[in-house]
Image: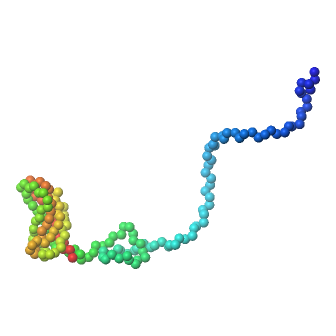
Amino acid sequence: MSLRSLGYGRKGDAGPSGATGATGATGATGAKGDTGATGPQGATGPAGSNATATPLATTAGRALGTAAVGTSASAAREDHVHPLPAGLLTLVGNVNVTETLIVSLAVGMKRMTLALAGVAVGDKLLAIPNGTPTSGCEVVNAYPAATAGNVSIGYYTPLLGIGATYTIPVSVYRIA
């Protein structure tokens, strides 16, 4: 028996290529790579319609007055303060609203008329505490009494007073 008869012999020529097989399944995603270097800065864009910033004001705010749009080309700072208008309030004087009670049940506002030189009938008055009132007390308003030289002060005291003395120091202003 020869080797040729058993299928062994010289190697023959290569045969034609077979058809392409089907695409296989996608493999797992690999790990993320390092971030690349930052690129160069781009060119500066064109200037906007307001190429220069509005300047900030360097002078103090004006006193309160008649409302107006204004003509200044400067912007105000957020922490600016306007001065109080001069001449609208005039101090007439100071009084003490003082009351001593044995037993009192006070519901609502009380009134006390006190002498205060300079108060005229028809004045517009404003009462402002000028010190620390007794706890639970509050001044409400002031208006001229029926006769010149007297002021009527409206005030509140605690609801129940037993053997108590209340004092509210008040400044009275005339409104121009």
| Quarter the N terminus occupies | top right
The residue closer to the viewer here, 47 or 169, is: 47
- Residue 105: % across, % down: 10, 55
The residue positioned 63% from the left and 43% from the top of the image is: 30
Q: Residue furthest top?
A: 1
2 to the left or right of 157: right
Q: Residue furthest left?
A: 102
Residue 94 appears anywhere in the view: no
| Position above or below: 55 against 3 | below
The count of marks equals 0
- Residue 148: % across, % down: 10, 75
153 to the left or right of 43: left
- Residue 86: % across, % down: 26, 76
Residue 33 appears anywhere in the view: yes
| Position above or below: 73 against 105 | below
The residue positioned 10% from the left and 68% from the top of the image is: 113
The residue positioned 89% from the left and 36% from the top of the image is: 13
Quadrant in the picture for residue 118 = bottom left
50 to the left or right of 125: right
- Coloring scheme used: rainbow
- Residue 110: % across, % down: 12, 62
Q: Residue furthest right?
A: 2
78 to the left or right of 106: right
The residue positioned 35% from the left and 74% from the top of the image is: 60
Quadrant in the picture for residue 176 = bottom left
The residue closer to the viewer here, 64 or 130, is: 64
